[in-house]
Image (tube, rainbow, N blue to C red):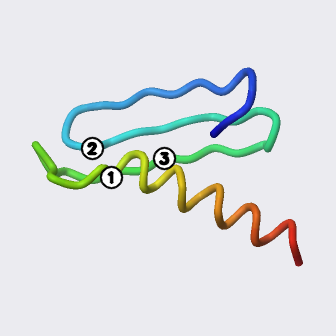
C-alpha cells in the first residue's frame, strides 16, 4: 500500500505518521502501548486506505 514519494516514521509504543503526497493524505496515529500483541500500525494503514476506497466509490 502507498505510492511513490510516501514517507513515514514509527515511534515507540505504537505511534506512527505517514505522508502520502499522491493522495494528499497525512495520517498521525498516537497510541501508548508497549509490546502490543496486535499489528496496530498495519491495521491503521489498511483502515485508512479502505476508507479512501469507499469514498472514491461513492
Question: Which callout, 1 or 2, points to the residue nearer the camera?
Answer: 1
Q: Which residue is mark 2?
A: 14
Residue 42 shown left or right of residue 54 in the figure: left
x, y percent for residue 29: 42, 50
Q: Residues within 10 Å of mark 2 (few under 14, many from 20)?
A: some
Residues at marks 1 and 3 touching, judged by CB atoms closer than 8 Å: no
Q: Residues within 10 Å of mark 3 (few under 14, many from 20)?
A: few
x, y percent for residue 43: 42, 55
Disc 1 versus disc 2: distance between alpha carbons? 7 Å
x, y percent for residue 46: 54, 55
- Going from the N terminus, do you reach mark 1 or mark 2 first? 2
- Give residue 15's quadrant in the image: top left
- Going from the N terminus, do you reach mark 1 or mark 3 first? 3
Rendered image: mark on residue 2: none
Residue 51 shown left or right of residue 4 in the figure: left
Q: Residues within 10 Å of mark 1 (few under 14, many from 20)?
A: some
Disc 1 versus disc 3: distance between alpha carbons? 13 Å
Q: Which residue is mark 1?
A: 40
Label 3 sits on a secondary structure element that is: strand
Label 1 sits on a secondary structure element that is: helix
x, y percent for residue 49: 65, 55
Q: Which residue is mark 3?
A: 28
Amino acid at each position: 500500500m502507498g505510492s511513490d514519494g510516501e514517507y513515514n516514521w514509527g515511534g515507540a509504543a505504537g505511534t506512527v505518521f505517514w505522508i502520502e503526497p499522491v493522495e494528499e493524505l497525512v495520517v498521525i496515529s498516537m497510541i501508548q502501548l508497549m509490546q502490543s500483541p496486535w499489528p496496530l500500525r498495519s491495521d491503521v494503514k489498511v483502515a485508512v486506505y479502505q476508507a479512501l476506497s469507499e469514498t472514491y466509490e461513492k
